Amino acid sequence: MTDTTSTFVAQDFHALSQEIIRAVETVIDGKREAVELALTTVLAEGHLLIEDVPGVGKTMLARALARSIDSSVHRIQFTPDLLPSDITGVSVFNQATREFEFKPGPVFANLVIGDEINRASPKTQSALLESMEEGQVSVDGSTYVLARPFTVVATQNPVEMEGTYPLPEAQRDRFMIRISMGYPDDVAELAMLRTRETASPLDDLVPVVSLEQLSGMIRVVRETFVSSAVEEYAVSIAQQTRRDRELRLGASPRATLHLVRAAKARAALDGREFVLPDDIDALAVPVMGHRLIAAARVAGTGTAAHSGSISEIIDRIVASTPVPLGTADSR
Amino acid sequence: MSSMSSNRTAPASKVDLWRSVWLFLAFTVTIGGLHTILAGIHWWIFSLLLIVLIFGSGILVRAVLGAGTLAARILAPVVGAIALLVTLVVSFVSDVSWLGFVPTGRSLDRVAKLLHDVSYSIIWQDVPANADAPILFLLGLGVGVLLLLAEIATFSLTLPALAGFPLLAVFLVPSFPPEGTTDGALFAASALAYFGLLLAGRPRRLVASLAIGTIAITGGLVLPGLMPSTKTTATASGLGPSVATGVNPMLRLGDDLREPDARVALTYSTVSGTPHYLRLVEVSNFFSLNWGPTQPALDVDNRPVEFPRPPGLGVGVTTWREVSYLHVANLLSPWLPVPYPASSITGLEGSWQYVPDSFTVASNRTLARGENYTVSSFVLDPTPDQLLASGTRVPANLDQYLSLPPDLPATISKTAQDVTRGKATNYEKALALQEFLRSPPFQYSTTAPVADGYDGTGVDVVAKFLEARSGYCIHFASAMAVLARDIGIPSRIIVGFQPGTLQNGDDDGRKLYQVTTADLHAWPELYFSGIGWIRFEPTPSRGVVPDYANPLVTGVPDVQTPAAGVGNLDASGLNPSAPLIDAGPTLAGWLTSDQPNRWLGWGALVLAPLGLILLPAGLRSLRRARILGRLRGGTGSVAAAWRELRESAEDVGVALLPTNTPREAVDILRRSHGMTETGNAALERIELAVETEGYGRPAGLSAESARTLAADLGTVIRCLHSGAEGNSRWRTLLLPPSLMGRTLRSARRLV
């Protein structure tokens, strides 16, 4: 790394991130935390799962985030009859060239919004999730690399159970962060009424960050320093979830990796060049909440009905894990 | 940017060097503490040499082989031991060693003799004792071994706390009574237990080691002072009867006689009902500056169950048998009080031996205290005719009882000639000398010698006494002995007890006599051919003049009637109505005694708990000062500063959990009691420093920011302390929970 460029971008970083947040907040009122977490996911090159009841602005958040960044955006409305090829794309026979030609699906974009992902069949879900993990799509023996940066923002409705296919654990693990929107408070709801009575504010949203700028921001996040103390802290929290009696499924190593990567993005958003244990603390529930399964619960869970107790367990684990201090013990 | 990161932990060799320096200082000072029992300074310089040699060789070995390496750990004490051995050989037995420093079989014999002599030297010398060759050898050997132990503990085992033991051992030396080995065994046992504790706990932290060391040393300092030990009373002269100290009674006799509170030394009864003089020691060597009891070669075969025939006792002398029953109450003396001449002693518990010529009974293992025994003895009753008949004959084998220093003051010879002019026989001369000393202007005084500066022994003192003509028993006795030798009568000085006072009670129907420290006495014994050694009483107003030496009884011509009467048992000149306190050297007796040193005792009693109470606070402040000092010096670490801040918060009851991140902790502190604006600003800077240093890219703390951190830390801690209220403030100050917590945590780790 070269010091000059990184500091230059680091200075921009703060301004740009603030602009994105402000832009998104013109659409979503009173959801600062959710907005920041969404941006964190994008900057950490992860995928976001927004899980909540209908009408609280899940899709609005995803679209606002997509709109504020000047990048290619595709939106997929998941339905039970959606096929994998509807996502990845198909090879069609070109009569003129007499060759099979690949027609890229909606997954070929920097930002993919998957609405109501639990409505699609598992087969279709898998197609998306595999491309999420691998960053590439294989169709008819050919491999097509997806765009960079690549972030999937999927929404899921936990209440409506009929005719849905809740994501299995392995799939949920691929999302870096899960957020629940929650209902707006009265002030925010009132403000929302006033601004949206006539027109959608989304229409007025113009991109504030170019794709290059976003790449630069991502580079800053990658270069954010993680001390071994913080790494140890993240690992000991993960280890603790695997030992905890109240949890049937603990955090995967991928969860630890996502936790640290998200923490780097959070640190960068906070204007720091290094990660603090506080970043880990703040992100433990958003990163791990959707991956852990409580022991006493019935299988087929992990939905919002239990997220309350899961986050309590995580909070407890975080609160009981000693925080190491970085420097060598002085004598 | 500074290069402070390299300073964060001092290199091991530097730490070792500092430890050596501290060890050097500690031993130098501690061994200096032996000045209470050793006279002069040469022994201290000798110890200093050993300290430098042993620790120096350790430093050298570590410098060559590398500090902390296994080879250095093993070799350093070995080289030190060789250095010690060579030093001892060169210093003491080089003339019988090969090339002067390689010990041979003959050197070992010599060492054995030195070690044999040292026990006598210790027992028979007064404190502060002259560090003669045997004592110096023992000191060298002991100090050397302790130094090696400290070296092994500190560097080979890397448990510097253990070095407190050798130090403590040096401290305890003056407090060991010369009896038994029990205390030593106990000390060794507790030392072993403590060693195990340390080894199990392995408190590697310097602070913990410091704390342990401090406690050990404080204990070593305070405890011997509080314990009613014999040597303590001896070193603080005037605290008690010094004969009870097991040291030279000659020098201290005056102190005992001046002691207002006489203490019961022993009680006895006799079959005949007659009281007797009880002898402790004989002094026959008048050469040395300070006369002391002749060091006897105790022979284990000389058990006092049967004595030989008294030396020189002729067949014609009237003797009758006497049996005495003695009970020694409180006499910490390696000599047994015995009437002369004893023929057998039964009922002794300890190991005692008689000294052939003097017929004194001594031990180098035990003390007289508590002994109950029965003595069969003769009572010699020579007639004046027999004594006159011995004329001026002196057997040839009594040279040692006739020798006098060559530089004898002229007044002594002149006085002897003047007093005995015209007397034909030794007997007449002896009577003349006794009469001369008992008559005015000679007078008994326990204080005059002190005022005039001749409160001691030696021929010079005798000369001064003959001019001043005022003194107490020791002066009269030594004057008569020296004068007698000058005119050719073999003489010796005996220190013991005059007969004591008759008690109201009885002992199995026999008359009971009580002997107190005020009865301590000295008298001369003179030798007459055909009769042997007989006692004289030149001290006016003290003791009983024996019949054969009393002109009233004997009617020897030309001998004037003595001014003082016979059997003046209770004319000690001291306060006879003073209650006899049988306190002995106990703590209570010691504290109630009417002496200036009592204040010292009270002071120690008050200061010791005070010191103990303040110890935690002191340790806590010490640690804080160390951390702040390092930061101010531009070194130190943020981690230490952060730990200090957390512990300070803990001390004032602000709970910071180990699960709190620095940011959370700072938030809690910000809300704590007593935090001010400046405190908050300081907290913010501390937070930044801790986070940057703790979790940022390793950069190292610059000296400047270290100083800032120190200042901020001080500010925040002051805020925290001002926030603590009332009782909790005091509790916090005196029993810092962080210190206790640390101790508890260490203890928990042990379990």
Image (tube, coloured by chain):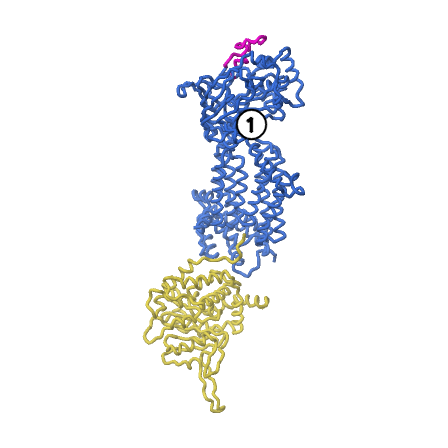
Chain colours: A yellow, B blue
Q: Which quadrant: the N terminus of chain B?
A: bottom right
Specify whether residue B98 is painted magenta: no
Give, as a three-letter code, the residue at label 1: Asn
- Asked whether residue B551 is drawn in magenta, I would say yes
Can you say whether A169 is above or below B283 in the image?
Answer: below
Would you identify the image quadrant in which residue B24 lies?
top right
Q: Position of residue B177 (x, y in %)?
A: 51, 33
Q: Toward the viewer: B595 or B275? A: B275
Instruction: Name the chief secondary structure element in magenta.
Output: loop
Q: Which residue is mark 1?
A: B248
* Segment tinted magenta in the rendering: B543-567
Quarter of the image for residue A170 reads bottom left
* Residue A290 placement (x, y as % from top left): 40, 68
Q: Is residue B516 visible?
A: yes
Q: Is residue B748 left or right of residue B627?
A: left
The chain carrying label 1 is: B
- Front residue of B230/B269: it is B269
Secondary structure of the residue carrying numbered label 1: loop
